[in-house]
Amino acid sequence: MDVLKKVPVREQDPKVRATNFDEVCLGYNKEEAVEEAGRCLGCQNAQCVKACPVSIDIPGFIKEVKEGNFEEAGYVIGKSSALPAVCGRVCPQETQCEGKCIRGIKGEPVSIGKLERFVADYARQNGIKPKKPESTNGRKVAVIGSGPAGLTCAGDLAKMGYDVTIFEALHEPGGVLVYGIPEFRLPKDDVVKPEIENVRSLGVKIETNVVIGKSVTIDDLMEKEGFEAVFIGSGAGLPKFMGIPGETASGVFSANEYLTRSNLMKAFRDDYDTPIRPGKKVAVVGGGNVAMDAARTALRLGAEVYIVYRRSEEELPARVEEVHHAKEEGIIFNLLTNPTEILVDENGWVKGMKCIRMELGEPDESGRRSPKEIPGSEFVLDVDTVIMSLGTSPNPLISSTTAGLDTNKRKCIVAEEENGATSKPGVFAGGDAVTGAATVILAMGAGKTAAKGIDEYLKNK
């Protein structure tokens, strides 16, 4: 065994997986997991734990894997995380836990994410559930949104003994886990639903088809329905557009709409009637993880797909693994390119996209080099579908229907970083509703922080 190198992870062949929606990464088996766990140095002052937004005892669970105690490893993770099978698949470990792994200084870091996935999958396959709280205090807390922030907050509060109800606007719980992340990265029936059921098994109730701000307001929940505290984890589902000519044409989607139709409404399956127009040639505008998800979905629906991004590959915000998988599958990257107009035919449908080449100038406020147009470099990209993946912002419905709830200029709810408290007493918030679009694990960290804040608030009330 070469302790400097990770145990390789098996994956579907790129040519095969580009034609199906089965999971790309196949994960570790028992022998591979034990071997990879053996590479962990078991650091006393573990930097990986400090870099984990939910503070999982990483050396602790890996030690149990190393010794073959997979069930105990699951309990160690379960103390900190409500969604280990999800995090093991979609967390950007390379910039968090694995990015701080001491083993990575002279070799490759330990595959912490793949080991977490293995433990979570083992627990699910063997019917191992999280431990229920021994007693409850009967105090009611409402959680708005059943995405990663809401599920984490609800799970932690339930473990503390609170009577928790999650209110979800859509017809299925899971938030971005069910509508935003494709099946080939995060299977819904095999992974997401069982993790949601684990949260339910702690005593959490989930009510779907409840739109807070329309069906009922936060003030109603607190004043009429007896909830002593509320956590807002409603995410950021309002898509952004460029504002260029032709953007309202038929055949232009937001990535949110495209992925929701495919993921939540099962448009990728022949036995579902959900309409989706895969197109023969698709341009996805943007360079983040959502752009990669939309592009790889369109590819699997039979299209030739282009990523159009105005900066270079070094500036791509998507995970390196996602870019690598997209390239392997045959997606074409048009970098240093920016759309200027969507061309529309006489029937109102997309018939092409005007673009201009870019070059990088000086760094902007974020430290990334600012792109600028190269005069005379215009060209037309031959596409019949355009997917805009330019980020999202929170829907203002909740903030506009809740008295005393402060928001900032980006329409995000203002909340204290240390406890999630908002300007309205008893109301807490976290995740994308506060930060704007970010990662699953950061939303989970915010949910965890808010659960502690709510507990302290109610104990002192």
Image: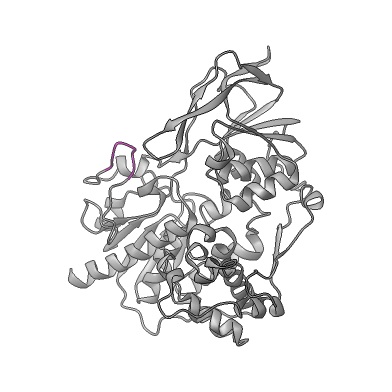
Q: Is residue 22 magenta?
A: no
- Residue sitting nearer the eye, 225 or 50: 50
Residue drawn at 32 percent across, 67 percent down: 140
Examine the rendering and report whether any part of residue 383 can be seen. Answer: yes
Looking at the picture, tell me which residue is in the foreground, 16 or 22.
16
Image coordinates of residue 279 in percent, x first then y, are: 73, 31
Q: In which quarter of the image is the C terminus?
A: bottom left
Task: Give the x, y percent position of residue 313.
Answer: 59, 40
Q: In which quarter of the image is residue 353?
A: top right
* Residue 409 is one of the magenta-drawn residues: yes
Which residues make up the magenta segment? 407-412
Position of 441 relative to 423 (above/below): below
Chief SS of the magenta region: loop
Considering every residue shown, the one lying at the far right of the view is: 16
Of the pair 217 and 56, the residue shown nearer to us: 56
- Relative to 206, does residue 125 appear above or below in the rendering? below
**Colour scheme of the rendered structure:** one colour
One can see residue 70 in this view: no
Residue 108 location, quadrant: bottom right
- Looking at the image, residue 265 sits to the left or right of residue 427; the answer is right
In the displayed structure, would residue 75 be above or below residue 267? below
In the picture shown, does residue 359 fall above or below 39?
A: above
Q: Position of residue 175 (x, y in %)?
A: 51, 53
Label tally: 0
Report the residue at 48% width, 23% height from top: 243
Q: Where is residue 349 in the image (x, y as percent from the top left)?
A: 67, 20
What quarter of the picture does the N terminus occupy?
Answer: bottom right
